[in-house]
Amino acid sequence: MTILERELSNSDLIYIYWEQDGKWYAYEQSAFYLSQMMLGVSLGRYVMEDTLWLAKAEVDVSRISHENIISYSKTEYVLHYTPHNGFHEWLAEIK
């Protein structure tokens, strides 16, 4: 299953992938969820296959709360999405 296929049906998980540059990244829905769950995570854009633009976030895996980890390996983390406690209060303030 490709990253895009996985993200199309992603409703409450965060997938983080280790890449050859030695860094960890989340894409699309996972990147959005991560930006809502962890302060300081910003979304960028990534071009795939010269035509498709994806949301991308670099991840410092040392900041991941162990209580959110479902599984992990040398190349992938899977987390359960739980929004940052202050996010809902912040959202209410800007509405």
Image (cartoon, helix red, strand yellow):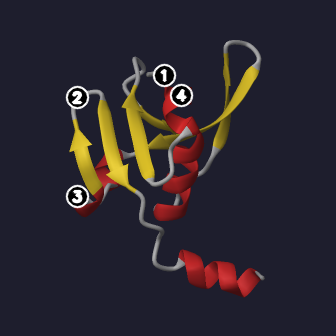
**What amino acid does circle 2 point to?**
Lys
**What amino acid does circle 4 point to?**
Glu
Residue of label 2:
74
Considering the image in quadrants, where does the N terminus appear?
top left
10 Å neighbourhood of mark 4: few (<14), some, or many (≥20)? few
Q: Nearer the viewer, residue 76 or 42?
A: 76
Residue of label 1:
2
**What amino acid does circle 3 point to?**
His
- Give the mark nearer the N terminus: 2 vs 1: 1
On the question of residue 74 being in view, the answer is yes
Q: Determine contact: label 2, label 1, CB under 8 Å.
A: no
Residue 93 pos. (x, y %): 70, 86
Q: CA distance from mark 3 to mark 2?
A: 16 Å
Task: Name the residue rendered at 41%, 40% in the picture.
Answer: 15
Task: Name the residue rendered at 50%, 44% in the picture.
Answer: 10
Considering the image in quadrants, where does the C terminus appear?
bottom right
Mark toward the viewer: 3 or 1: 1
Q: Determine contact: label 3, label 2, CB under 8 Å.
A: no
